[in-house]
Amino acid sequence: MEAIILAGGFGTRLQSVVKDVPKPMADVLGRPFLTYILDELVKYNFTKVVLAVGYKKEIIEDYFGDSYKSLKIIYSIEDEPLGTGGCVKKALSYVSDKFVFIINGDTLFKINYEDMSSIKSTSIACKYLENFDRYGEVIINDNGVITSFLEKKHVDKGYINGGIYYLPKNIFDNYQLPKKFSLEKDFFEKYIVDLQIKSFKSTDYFIDIGIPSDYQKIQKDLAKPKALFLDRDGIVNIDFGHVYKIKDFKFTDFIFDLCKKYQSNGYLIFIITNQAGIGKGLYTEKDFLILTEYMLNEFKKHDISITKVYYCPHKPEDNCDCRKPKPGMFLKAIKEFNVDVENSVAIGDKMSDLEAAHLAGIKNLFFKYTKYEKYNVNFRYIALTT
């Protein structure tokens, strides 16, 4: 896959906190904001990125050169302001693939690029928000097609343009366009009926660093990823005892809303589960993995990305280091993803879930059970009763 990143922004609204660099080069925890966008592309195996540069382009060129990790970098240089449309049109000459992602260089939107690329049609990544007035709302019909872009006003809940586009390389071929034009106003909005733009809906982490308050917010958000640790049986699904068949797997009525809430606030989501049924011979590891794939696909249908599932296949008498209440699975996730333990959360329906999380250093512990019972443990937790 290939991408064009619009990296020529002046950063006028950021001048009070970021000076003398293009907006995508604003410092975030000791490195340019642009590197965080590029890291997302590396994660999804992009091969080439075109950086559309203009204002103080030499700062970007000197920092990145012709590559970043596994990405080949090419520069499309804007000698005069061309607007987002003119900038993209010029950069498309450096693209080899039939389709290309266009990404705003001042926005970090952690979508699943592989899923969006499967649309194979002109599309826009749309972020779900609640109580917003900084962005214009995007109206989407029942077929997932964008029908209009509304002006900024207060909206209780809806979708906004997330600043990531998936376009065919020849998208401008049949249109008479000026040298300088806005991709959003002069193209998407003007030709909205003709283009039939598909929406790619997402609740993934989103931030636009265009204003000082959000620039300060991202410093906190990206310091270390926070995580939501979930037990499986009893939290993700109703616990019928040794659930291993798809027909017996029933999601709890709260799990999707819960995960969306945490995901939209930048949390990674892990599922940490004891699966002694494997060790006892009640079902196979293959049975578990088939059910896990089904579970993850159902989460995906709700725009929820589970970062990883950790499971212990051992019996209690095996005395392993991974079975809860031992913290092995939590510690593995924390190390592998450099998790911010202090601000992470664990939810379980057995005290062994919380004991393991506590031993791993997690302090925000929630106990979910149909009947609350007080346990004599040496740590604090909050009981969630139904």
Image (spheres, grey):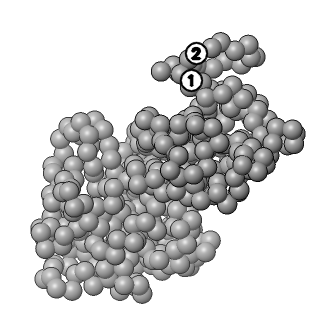
In which quarter of the view is residue 344 placed?
Answer: top right
Residue shown at the point (71%, 42%) measured from the top left: 274
Q: Secondary structure at mark 1?
A: strand
Give how far across and how far down residue 2 sits, in percent. 45, 77
Amino acid type of the residue tagged 2 in the rendering: Tyr
Residue shown at the point (19%, 45%) measured from the top left: 152
| Between 137 and 327, the one nearer to me in the picture | 327
Q: Are marks 2 and 1 in contact (CB under 8 Å)?
A: yes
Q: Is residue 201 left or right of residue 189?
A: right
Up the image or down, 110 lies above or below 115; here it is above
Q: Secondary structure at mark 2?
A: loop
Q: Is residue 185 left or right of residue 218?
A: left
Residue 372, numbered circle: 2
Residue shown at the point (15%, 60%) measured from the top left: 147
Amino acid type of the residue tagged 1 in the rendering: Tyr
| Between 108 and 271, the one nearer to me in the picture | 271
Q: Is residue 310 left or right of residue 303?
A: right
Asked whether residue 41 is in view, the answer is yes
| Between 123 and 82, the one nearer to me in the picture | 123
Up the image or down, 306 lies above or below 168; here it is above
Q: Residues within 10 Å of mark 1 (few under 14, many from 20)?
A: some
Up the image or down, 206 lies above or below 228; here it is below
Residue 369, numbered circle: 1
Mark 2 vs mark 1, CA separation in Å: 6 Å
Up the image or down, 283 lies above or below 53; here it is above
Asked whether residue 90 is in view, the answer is no
| Between 104 and 286, the one nearer to me in the picture | 286
